[in-house]
Image (spheres, rainbow, N blue to C red):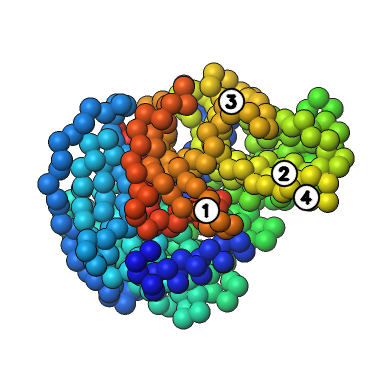
Amino acid sequence: MRNPILLSLLCLVLLSSCGSAPADTPPVPAETGAAIVAAATATVAAEPTAEPSPTAAPLPYSGPNPRLAIWGYEGEQLVIRVIELGSEEVVATIPVEDSWRMALSPDGRMLFNSVNLGRAGMIYDLESGESRAIDLSAQVTAEGTLGQAVWSPSQQWLNFQTHNAGLNSLWAYSLETGDLTHVADARVVNWSSTEDIVSYVSGNLRATYDLTTGQETVWPSPRYEALEVSLTHDGLKPDFNSPACWYVCVHPELGQVRDYQSSQRSAGRYYYDLIDSGTVELLAHVATFQTERSLTQETYNPEVAKLFPLWQRGDYLLFVLESAAGPDYQDSRLQLYSAWSPSGELPFTVVEGEVTNTLPDVLPVAVSPDGTAFVGFRFTQPEDYVYLVESAVVVDLATAEILYEYSVSSESVYFLPPTEVLGAHLVWPGE
């Protein structure tokens, strides 16, 4: 990182990320079940400057191309470049003084960037070159920081997560009126698949908020006795003590949906399920995780930190944090990987230590419009708690083949486990 101030800010985020895990752009429901679907004038208000496009190479995939927004330098000037992957056309180059959080709109035509730890922001229209400033100084205190920014499905709202003195708050910015609305003091954000309804978690409270009507709906706590019956597989009962529902929590169109693991210490099997806690209905048994470890003496825990429904295939793409350790927590390790079913059928099995159905060190970010591929970030971990993004990759879901790779190793990009990248953002616009 060539900007020492920016490096200091990155170190602050790396240290603070362990206490609060931000949500990413939410998934939408699949046919077989459900998934969960989260300035004072900016320092530099430069308009995007289109650059000449290089000769386009043949694309290894069809349909609209993914778009990548990423930090970089031109000489000593920090810029954000928006690049169309495949052709590698530079859609826009935006000079900035610094960059704290960025987010491309779902159609890839607008970009939000915040500066000064998030107390000022700017939205750029990449086609018209117009921009607008957002004053976030009242929402982000001098001691606070701005969390992830997430666009609503209609792109008429931007949701912001703020972290001030240990308090997490959600705010919604209207692109139509320029107003900032306080949604809740909460930490997890998901958007509905089609409507501007945001869901969140605050303690044991799980709720949705309709930004169009201002209506808040609070979902009831799950009924564990009834859930135990629905979630028992092969005689293995659910483990309600596991830290379930960190990211996959409330689906605005279905009610409360949770992820659960069923386990038995001697069996070495974990079952990942999606269930409507209000109706006690099992929506989908997604995957089985299997280990040969003797769990009476060792620990093994697969956490699904991110989930995408694959509409056409009827299954799911997962991002898994798999932790394991020997007796007395010796030889502890953490593996991060994408996982999905090659056949497209549910449930699928992930066996510890085998590469089948998994792609190590790849964070999925968006699925192609035709459902045949996904785009994500490949990363490395040079030291504890530091993750560096090496490239953006397009992966074929049928073969796990890397169809396309764009190197970002020379750029200033950090990966904050388990779901967020700082300094880069990907979207895959629809048809």
* Residue type, numbered disc 2: Ala
Residue 193, visible in the rendered structure: no
Circle 4 SS class: loop
Q: Badge 4: few (under 14), some or many (20 or more) residues near its Cα, within 10 Å?
A: few
Residue at 56% over, 31% down = 358
Circle 3 SS class: loop
| Quarter of the figure that contains the C terminus | top left
* Residue type, numbered disc 1: Pro
Nearer to us of marks 3 and 4 is 4
Residue 48 falls in image quadrant: bottom left
Q: Which mark is residue 356?
A: 3
Residue at 60% over, 72% down = 166
Counting from the top left corner in percent of width and height, residue 236 is at 82, 31
User: Farthest residue in the left direction?
Assistant: 52
Mark toward the start of the polypeptide (3 vs 1): 3
* Residue type, numbered disc 4: Gln
Mark 3 → mark 2, Cα distance in angstroms: 19 Å
Counting from the top left corner in percent of width and height, residue 156 is at 34, 54
Nearer to us of marks 3 and 1 is 1
Mark toward the start of the polypeptide (2 vs 1): 2
Residue at 51% over, 37% down = 308
Mark toward the start of the polypeptide (3 vs 4): 4
Q: Find disc 4 in the rendering and name its residue.
A: 330
Mark 3 → mark 4, Cα distance in angstroms: 26 Å
With respect to residue 276, does 51 lie above or below?
A: below
Q: Badge 2: few (under 14), some or many (20 or more) residues near its Cα, within 10 Å?
A: some
Q: Find disc 1 in the rendering and name its residue.
A: 382
| Quarter of the figure that contains the N terminus | bottom left
Q: Which mark is residue 324?
A: 2
Residue at 45% over, 70% down = 9
